Amino acid sequence: MGNLTRRNPMGEFEDMVDRYNRLFGLNRNAGEREGLLTRSDWTPAVDIKETDSAFTIEAELPGMNKEDVKVTVHDGVLTIQGERHKEEESGDKKHHRIERFYGRFTRRFTLPDNVDEASIAAGFKDGLLTLTLTKQEPREPKAIEVEVN
């Protein structure tokens, strides 16, 4: 009788995702800038909500402090970036499993035209970054008269 091979669908899925990430240069361990693209070691989960007056972006950043996070707005793009540091290794600890991601991350969001970039507010509590983006009246397109000679 031959050897039985035990199937591990989850392991096969993880292998497929790792191959895909390597193909597109999204390796978790890369954490480096290449040209205009930023590679991230991990990606925080984000919820985006909308009310009549504002958008709210909530990013889960467990184990991080507000000093580890930077939020910027440039040319209509909101960028959240930061780094979650791994705890110091010590000789008396034995790690059996590490599932949390560490290292740098970057998330970018293109802002709608009706967001007032000057009024974006940020709060950070219990590992949750909350950004409030107040809405404004959409800018009217500016007509430019063209003279024909």
Image (tube, grey):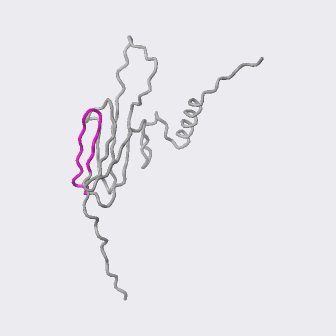
Q: Residue at x 34, y 58 (%)?
A: 112
Q: Is residue 42 magenta?
A: no
Judged from this view, the residue extending furthest toward the bottom is: 149
Snapshot quadrant of residue 82 = top left
Residue 40: % across, % down: 42, 39
Horizontal side of 111 relative to 33 (left or right) equals left
Judged from this view, the residue extending furthest toward the top is: 92
Q: Where 97 falls versus 114 (above or below)?
A: above
Q: Residue at x 31, y 71 (%)?
A: 141
Q: Quadrant of the C terminus?
A: bottom left
Judged from this view, the residue extending furthest toward the front is: 52
Q: Residue at x 26, y 48 (%)?
A: 132
Q: Residue at x 56, y 30 (%)?
A: 10
Snapshot quadrant of residue 127 = top left
Q: Is residue 122 magenta?
A: yes
Residue 124: % across, % down: 25, 38
- Range of residues picked out in magenta: 116-132
Q: Where 89 falls versus 34 (above or below)?
A: above
Residue 148: % across, % down: 37, 87
Q: Quadrant of the N terminus?
A: top right
Q: Where 42 falls versus 34 (above or below)?
A: above
Residue 12: % across, % down: 59, 32
Looking at the picture, tell me which residue is in the foreground, 29 or 76.
Answer: 76
Q: How many marks?
A: 0
